[in-house]
Image (spheres, rainbow, N blue to C red):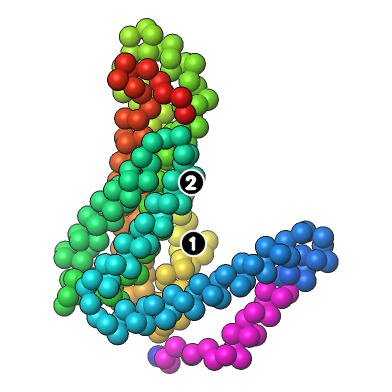
Amino acid sequence: MQELIKLNLLDLVLAVGLMVISISLSAVENLGLELNLALATGRTILQLIVLGYVLEFIFALDNVWAVLGLLAIMLTITAIVAQNWIGKKIPRVFPLVWRSIFFSTTVILLYTEFLIIQPDRWYEARYLIPLGSILVGNALNSAVVSGERLVSTVKQFSGEIETHLSLGATPQQVVKGYRRDAIRSALTPVLNQMLLIGIVSIPSFTNGQLLAGTKPLDAVSYEILIMFMIVTTNLITALLVTQGICQQLFNSLLQLNDI
């Protein structure tokens, strides 16, 4: 099979032409997206070029601390984003999300590295960085969806919750159903994706592997592994995040806090 065709500078300039077409169409149709498209184009180019150099450096360095350091930076940025989405009135959201995603991704990565892939060195950058970044990115979505859904639902039904509390129900009993719905909402997108994967479209990871010259059956084997890793990571993350938020919704007198 032919090796991956490399793109030169002219190819990338022509690729930018696709965004020029998008900006032009937005202007013709008065969509008002020209500035957003231009900013997204610039940020995509800059961020991916920086990422390319960083990965080149880390791959060449071949050091466990460099690999773990990059994943830690990704995890920290992810926790900051999740904190902004879930709500600033919930105390200690940042460490809660950080710990939750760290635990879920670490457990799944170690399981995969030592029991399934079994590379010569468990910290090989070519495996740990791509798999870790995929899990962290998906865990972010799970944390945000489950956390934001739980907080918004509690706000919406605060009167009902306080009524149940006044009648003697415990906080765990009151929020059990809301927490379950929040977790289910976080898992729904990836479950829907699994139902349609390989039928409606070819997954991005598989496409990348095919472009790199990997045999189709080898590519889909990794896609199966990654999907199962994502589901388990997302579920663990949602469980931990919602449990942590539930513990912060009530004060020592078992009263609902102002959120």
Indicate whether 127 appears above or below 226: below
Compute the Cα span from label 1 to label 2: 35 Å
Total number of numbered discs in the rendering: 2
Q: Which circle's residue, 1 or 2, is located before the other in the chain?
A: 2
Indicate whether 51 appears above or below 138: below
Mark 1 neighbour density, 10 Å: few (under 14) some (14–19) many (20 or more)? few
What is the span of residues highlighted in magenta in the rendered image? 2-21
Mark 2 neighbour density, 10 Å: few (under 14) some (14–19) many (20 or more)? few
> What residue would you read off at disc 2?
84
Residue drawn at the location 39% of the way across and 51% of the way down: 79
Q: Amino acid at mark 2?
A: Asn
Can you say which quadrant of the picture contains the N terminus?
A: bottom left
Disc 1, SS: loop
Q: Which mark is residue 177?
A: none
The location of residue 128, given as percent across then percent down, is 28, 69
> What residue would you read off at disc 1?
199
The location of residue 15, given as percent across then percent down, is 62, 81
Residue 44 falls within the magenta-colored stretch: no
The location of residue 181, given as percent across then percent down, is 42, 33
Indicate whether 248 appears above or below 49: above
Quarter of the image for residue 117 reads bottom left
Q: Nearest the camera: 22 or 232? A: 22
Magenta span: predominant SS is helix
Instruction: Indicate left or right for 69 with 13 as reference.
Output: left
Are circles 1 and 2 on residues that touch, CB within 8 Å?
no
Instruction: Indicate left or right for 138 with 23 as reference.
Output: left
Residue drawn at the location 80% of the way across and 66% of the way down: 27
Quarter of the image for residue 241 reads top left
Residue drawn at the location 41% of the way across and 23% of the way down: 257
Residue 8 falls within the magenta-colored stretch: yes
